[in-house]
Image (cartoon, rainbow, N blue to C red):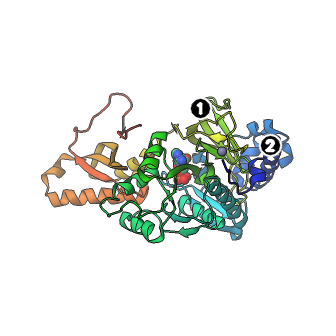
Amino acid sequence: MDIPFWSKEIETLDRASLQAIQLERLRDMVSWALKTPFYNKKLSSVGIRSPEDIRGFRDLERIPFTTKDDLRRSFPKGLLAVEMTEVVRIHSSSGTTGIPTVIYYTRDDVDRWTDLLARSIVATGASAQDIFQNMMSYGLFTGGLGLHYGAERVGMAVIPIGGGNTKRQIQTMKDFQTTILHVTPSYLLHIHSQFEAEGVKAGDLALRRAFIGAEPHSENTRRKIDDLLHIQAFNSYGLSELNGPGVAFECVCRKDMHLWEDAYIVEIIDPTTGRNVEDGQEGEVVLTNLIRRAMPILRYRTRDLAFLHPEPCECGRTHRRLSRILGRTDDMLIINGVNVFPSQIEEKIMKVPEVATNYQIHVDKKGALDRLTVKVEIYPKLFLGDVAKLEALRARIREELRSSIVISPNVELHEPGSLPVSEGKAKRVVDERPKD
Ligand code: AMP
Ligand code: ZN
C-alpha cells in the first residue's frame, strides 16, 4: 500500500525521540502555564515553580488534573498566558452550563494546530486535488474553522458552506463535484436519506471520502456510511480545550485514530483512582496540550472513555492509536454533534414561572438525526386557559432553551403528576437512540 505523509519524519519518529520532544515541549508549556494565575497556584502547590522542576515523565504525574469546572471558574482570562494583543483567535466549547469555556490562540498556535490538521487530512489519502465541502458549523465551534485552515494548507479547494440547508448541500456537491465532506455522521446519513427526493442519480456526485466526528458513532455506522455513499469515512476526534479537531485522526488503514503525540501527551486513567492504566485498557482520556502558548492546558480530564492500541499501525506511524470514544464519565449528551448538559436544560426551565417541579429530557432518533424533546409539567390551572396561551408558553420555553443549548428542542407540556417520578435518584434523561 502506498502510504501518504505530510511530515513523514515526525510521524514515523522512533518512540524515544518522540518522548524527548514531548518532555522538552512539556517544560516549555509549564513555563507558559506558570504565567497564568490559575496554573501558578496549582503548580506551586505541588512544588513546581519552574520548568526545570520537570525532570522526567515521572514529574508529569505530580501535575494536578485540570477539569472543565476549573476552566469555568477561571473565565474569562484566568488561563490566558499572553497579552491579549498577541491573541488572534478565540473559540469556545459547544457545551456549557451557563459560563462558557473560552480558548485563546496566538498566531503561532493557530499555525501549529493547522499543521496537525494538514497532517491528518493527508494521512487519509486526501490531497491538493480534492474539493472539500466543509459542512461543520463555523463560528465559536472549532470544527468549522479548524478543518478549513488545514484543508487550505493542504491546497484543496475549500467550500466553506457550514452546517444545515440540506438542499443546498446536495446542490453544492453536484455543482462543484465535491470529493470530500466534513460532517457529523448523523447529518451525513440524513443528507443521504434526501438524495432520492433531490433527484440525485448515480454518477451525479464525485464523493470519495468523509471526515466524520464531533459525536460518538460505531463501526457499524461507519460501514453504513461507506456502503450507502460508496465512500470511505474517517473518524476525527478533538475537543476545543485541546485546540479542536486534529487531536486524533484515522489514517488510510482506518483502524482507529493516530493521536499526534508530538503535540499532545495522552494518558488513559482509571476515572475513580486517577491512576494510569495499561495500553489496551479502557479509561478516561487525559490530554496535555504541547503546542498552545496563549492558553496552556495540562492533564485535562476530557471525560471521554477510550483505550490506546498497544500494537503499532501498519502504516508505519509511531504515534499511538486511540480507539473510538466508547462513552462519557459524565452525563453530557451529544445531540447531532452539539454538546448538551442536562443541567443547562434544568436551569432554563426552572426559571419559567409556569413550570411546576417535574420534567424529563427525551432523546431519540428521527430518521438519521437525533431528536431532543423536553417534557415539562406545568401548573394545572394553565390547562384551563386557551390553547393559544399554551402554545405561546411552549414557544417561550423552546426559545429559552435554544438560547442556552444552541439547538431547538421539541417542548411538550404535561399536567402535574403525569411524568414518571422515581423514588430514588430522579431519572431525568431517557436516551432511546439505538446503540448499534
Ligand atoms: P467540543 O469541545 O465542543 O468540540 O466537543 C468535544 C467533545 O465532542 C469531545 O470531548 C467528545 O465527547 C465529542 N467528540 C468529538 N469528536 C468525537 C468523535 N470522533 N467521536 C466521539 N465523540 C467525539
Ligand atoms: Zn496508521
Measuring from the top left, give residue 372's x and y in whole percent: 35, 49
Q: Residue at x 50, y 39 (%)?
A: 330
Cα separation between marks 2 and 1: 25 Å
Question: Circle 2: is it few (<14), some (14-19), or many (20+) Cα within 10 Å?
Answer: few
- Would you say 110 lies left or right of 168 here? right
Q: Amino acid at mark 1?
A: Glu
Three-letter code for the amino acid on which mark 2 is drawn? Asp
Task: Return the x and y of residue 385 as percentages of the image width and height.
Answer: 14, 55
Where does residue 241 sit, x and y in percent of width and height? Answer: 61, 52
Quadrant in the rendering for residue 268: top right
Nearest-to-viewer mark from 2 and 1: 2
Q: Which residue is mark 2?
A: 14
Location of mark 1 (residue): 282
Q: Position of residue 194 (x, y in %)?
A: 33, 58
Q: Are marks 2 and 1 in contact (CB under 8 Å)?
A: no
Residue sitting at x 44%, y 71%: 175
Say few, some or many: other residues with alpha carbon within 10 Å of mark 1 (under 14 / 14 to 19 / 20 or more).
some
The answer to which of marks 2 and 1 sits earlier in the sequence is 2
Residue at (34% x, 51% y) in the render: 349
Instruction: Give the quarter of the figure containing the C terminus.
Output: top left
